[in-house]
Image (cartoon, rainbow, N blue to C red):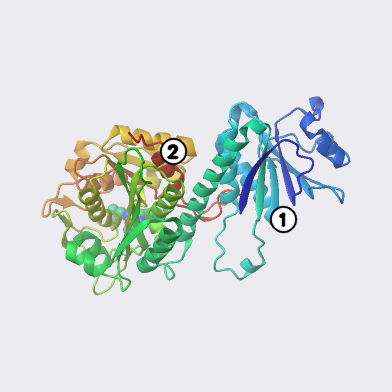
């Protein structure tokens, strides 16, 4: 999909669909805005007629299609309500663009023009970035395994029209960045949506290799033998029940020469390609959707892709522990004691608490190998997280208040909701073991906190945040912006966190 930004007149835009946003208005007081007069004239007054009918008042989410007479540049005009300007936020802007592209593709349109809402609150740059994100996110759906995908006509071109020519360059650059970020989020969605029979750990590694090649990331992948040689005892314990062998995937973005300073950040993802629970088998209704248990890893691949394409001036290492958690004669057991890469031992209580074992080794490896200034992990770690927060937010916990604040700010800026849960020394103490150094699980209460507290034993003194994305990694509800299935949550906020990282 090609995304461009133009400025100026809108009456000559040729498009299958021309989307026209309207702030909410009172029908009795409505007058045709000067900017629309030439367009309305070209359409024989149909916009003014439609609005005078009272069928459309610009309420958020409201829309009305006006068909153009033959010969007009735009085939149809979609009036779209955005509500009161005072309440316009970037989330609504993304929704708007997504709804416009959905409507166009429902009508088999390939070319969309969208007039950027004029807003006193949102600057043209932020507006065009959000519009681009919305258009790209709204054009995604998981149809890889549907016969009907062949009938789908892909969107070719989306044009946003802003008011002032002076803003065009900056707005174009912002839109281009929005495309990169949203395409990276769609990549994360796609990887997470892939079924477990098509995407075992080896295939996830292959997918990462393909991305690395496309965007110029360094990559190395370690298999079972290498991991065993190096002592990834916890990760390997989880993996040993499956015939699909584990992989450690390491993606590396190095800034261009001359970048002034290059702090290293590590972004770590849980990549459980399928979580059956292992011998502590999940009931069937809980096992469904467990293909999404590698969503943290998928978000890491998406974020590293964006970091490379945006040429961020940081050294960023993405690490994904990819395994499958299966029951079998070779599976690890409750009561097993595993020796982690860090040397600390863990007594297994429940083989379904596998994510923290994988992360324990990958966090230790990241810290000791790359000595990062900060580590961020993303993981669909606990069902308890949705009990605490519902499916409206991910949890953020960490050992460094400044880093937690950065995540909260990045979430705020990108519309990805995070809520902080406490992580105190008492929690860390609680996870000290009786028969092994560290407990695997911490009991029924505060499950998201105790899982994070367990990870804390493996991060040393490195500033670290843990993002439990279990509640938000996939969704049953479907909207224009977010179809059923994987959300790609984390890509936007991680990219924002990296983009806003001080580089000196
Ligand atoms: N992958 C699950 C967490 C999960 C649950 C993600 C539901 C998304 C939706 C994780 O591996 C798990 O099974 N956690 C256990 C931990 C427990 C055994 C301490 C859980 O949440 O029940
Ligand atoms: Mn599990
Ligand atoms: Zn899991």
| Quadrant of the image occupied by residue 429 | top left
* Residue at (29% x, 39% y) in the render: 398
User: Mark 1, residues whose alpha carbon is within 10 Å: few (<14), some, or many (≥20)?
Assistant: many
Image vertical order of residue 274 relative to residue 260, above or below? below
Image vertical order of residue 386 relative to residue 30, above or below? below
- Where in the figure is residue 450, as x and y percent of width and height? 26, 45
Do we see residue 479 in this rendering? no
Do we see residue 454 in this rendering? yes
Helix, strand or loop at label 2? It is: helix
Q: Earlier in the sequence, mark 1 or mark 2?
A: 1
Q: Quadrant of the N terminus?
A: bottom right
Residue contact at pointers 1 and 2, CB within 8 angstroms: no
Q: Which mark is residue 109?
A: 1
Image vertical order of residue 401 relative to residue 16, above or below? above
- Where in the figure is residue 321, as x and y percent of width and height? 31, 58
The single residue placed furthest to the front in the displayed view is 258
- Where in the figure is residue 115, as x and y percent of width and height? 69, 39
Q: Quadrant of the C terminus?
A: top left
User: Mark 2, residues whose alpha carbon is within 10 Å: few (<14), some, or many (≥20)?
Assistant: many
């Amino acid at each position: 999909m090609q995304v461009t930004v133009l400025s100026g007149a809108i009456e000559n835009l040729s498009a299958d669909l021309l989307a026209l946003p309207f702030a909410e208005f009172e029908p009795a007081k409505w007058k045709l805005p000067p900017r629309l007069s030439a367009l309305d004239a070209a359409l024989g007054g149909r916009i003014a007629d439609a609005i005078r009918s009272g069928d459309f008042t610009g309420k958020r989410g409201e829309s009305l299609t006006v068909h153009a007479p033959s010969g007009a540049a735009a085939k149809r005009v979609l009036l779209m309500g955005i509500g009161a300007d005072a309440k316009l936020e970037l989330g609504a802007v993304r929704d708007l663009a997504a709804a416009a592209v959905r409507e166009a593709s429902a009508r088999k349109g390939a070319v969309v023009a969208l007039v950027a809402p004029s807003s006193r609150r949102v600057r043209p740059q932020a507006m065009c970035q959000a519009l681009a994100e919305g258009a790209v996110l709204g054009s995604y759906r998981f149809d890889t395994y549907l016969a009907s995908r062949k009938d789908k006509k892909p969107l070719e071109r989306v044009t946003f029209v802003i008011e002032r020519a002076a803003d065009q360059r900056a707005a174009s650059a912002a839109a281009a960045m929005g495309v990169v970020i949203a395409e990276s989020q769609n990549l994360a969605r796609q990887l997470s949506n892939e079924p477990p029979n098509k995407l075992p750990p080896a295939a996830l590694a292959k997918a990462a290799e393909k991305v690395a090649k496309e965007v110029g990331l360094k990559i190395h992948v370690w298999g079972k033998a290498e991991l065993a040689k190096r002592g990834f005892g916890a990760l390997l314990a989880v993996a040993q029940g499956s015939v699909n062998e584990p992989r450690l995937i390491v993606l590396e973005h190095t800034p261009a020469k001359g970048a002034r300073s290059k702090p290293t950040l590590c972004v770590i993802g849980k990549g459980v390609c399928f979580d059956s629970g292992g011998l502590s088998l999940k009931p069937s209704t809980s096992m469904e959707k467990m293909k999404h248990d590698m969503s943290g890893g998928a978000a890491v691949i998406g974020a590293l892709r964006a970091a490379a394409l945006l040429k961020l001036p940081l050294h960023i290492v993405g690490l994904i522990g990819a395994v499958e958690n299966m029951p079998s004669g070779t599976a690890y057991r409750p009561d097993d004691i595993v020796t982690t890469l860090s040397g600390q031992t863990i007594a297994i209580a429940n083989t379904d608490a596998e994510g923290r074992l994988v992360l324990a080794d990958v966090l230790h490896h990241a810290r000791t190998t790359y000595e990062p200034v900060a580590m961020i992990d993303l993981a669909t770690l606990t069902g308890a997280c949705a009990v605490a927060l519902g499916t409206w937010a991910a949890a953020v916990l960490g050992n460094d208040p400044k880093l937690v604040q950065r995540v909260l700010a990045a979430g705020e800026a990108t519309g990805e909701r995070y809520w902080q849960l406490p992580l105190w020394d008492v929690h860390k103490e609680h996870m000290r073991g009786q028969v092994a150094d560290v407990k695997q699980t911490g009991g029924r209460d505060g499950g998201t906190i105790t899982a994070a507290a367990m990870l804390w034993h493996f991060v040393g003194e490195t500033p670290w945040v843990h993002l439990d994305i279990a509640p938000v990694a996939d969704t049953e509800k479907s909207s224009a912006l977010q179809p059923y299935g994987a959300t790609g949550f984390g890509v936007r906020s991680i990219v924002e966190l990296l983009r806003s990282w001080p580089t000196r």
